Amino acid sequence: MTSVPAPRSHVAFREIAPVSWEHPADRAALQAMRAVPGFDEVVKKVIGLLGGERGIRLLFQGNAVRVTPLQYPRAHQLLVEVCATFDWPRTPEMFVSQTPVFNAGAYGVDDPFIVLHTAALELLDDEELRVLIAHEMGHVMSGHALYHTIAAILFMVSLSALPLLAGIALLPIKLAVLEWSRKSELSADRAGLLGGQNIMASQQLFMKMAGGYRKALDSGEMNLNEFMVQANEYANTHEDMDIIYKILNTLGLTHPMNTVRAAEIQKWMTAGDYDRILRGEYTKRGQEQKDRPLKDDLGAATSYYAEAGKEVVTEVTNVAKRAAQAAKDAFTKARTGA
């Protein structure tokens, strides 16, 4: 186990289990994804195509910079401190990849590793970078890396370019993987907050991912309060077909909208779950099934999806009623010559 302590200003979570912060919809979507016919075969074939654990890691060893105490020491120190905060026994490898797209990821099979994009390092201060690394550690601890690797392949590569998967109905699998991927980000966002323990840094991370650039940051042109107003507006927009448009706009994405993520983490804090974990009220590793059985998460996820579905049905009904009323008014107007 690492001997490096968590930062003095941070609460350390001894033997914390990732189920303590996992979003119920994440675990439910994972079970649904695994149940899609052909999913296991896709996983085996894609991992085989990539050369397994070693092949995936070599992609980054060959064309990215490995983070060490002498190479990106700031990021390395933050990673070690985050592992100490989560009481995680092994510090995973981390790489920096040259790309202008702001992102990061956790990949691998049995021995996951983290990849940071240079665009993220350019835009984030230390506290925000700590949140991002803690977010990726959340993926590592929850065992998300394997399926994130599959999601990345299915998202980046045309389905027609994977002849080895011929005969498998890939679209349902791709949609299920993407749905789980989006929900897994909600879990990791909570881990980011717990690892960073800085709500402003967490929300600023979402704002910078949504539309940050160096000149605006240096000149003070970005305002977190304005971004949170925007996030709440998006979360509470229910006019006409807005909810349906939101779903359609999201179906092909691996991540939720950044305003959605900001609103979700705010909601999680408001519900008191963040403070509860800070007080030491969380599930420890090895107690997951006893303290929080999967059926409880499935029940919570059912409520989450039912509420979302209710909004869609309600909105469709309201739109249909308005359309019917408009048609009726037009017909009446035509008959009366008004």
Image (cartoon, rainbow, N blue to C red):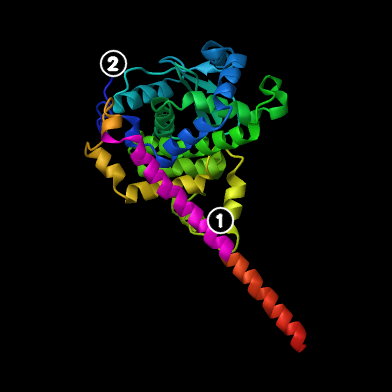
Q: Quarter holding the C terminus?
A: bottom right
Q: Is residue 40 above or below residue 173?
A: above
Magenta part of the protein: which range?
A: 291-317
Q: Secondary structure at mark 1?
A: helix
Locate the N terminus by quadrant. Answer: top left
Q: Residue at x 59, y 23 (%)?
A: 42
Image position of 54 with respect to 325: above or below: above
Compared across the picture, whether 37 is left or right of 68 comes to right
Residue 235 circle label = none
Q: Position of residue 119 (x, y in %)?
A: 55, 31
Q: Earlier in the sequence, mark 2 or mark 1?
A: 2
Along the viewing direction, whichever of 248 and 32 lies nearer the viewer: 32
Residue at point 60% right, 15% down?
50
Q: Is residue 152 visible?
A: yes
| Three-letter residue code for mark 2 | Met
In this view, the residue in front, 223 or 131, is 131
- Disc on res. 1: 2
Crowd band around label 1 with a 10 angstrom C-alpha radius: few (<14), some (14–19), many (20+):
many
Q: Secondary structure at mark 2?
A: loop
Quick one: 33 or 60, which is closer to the camera? 33
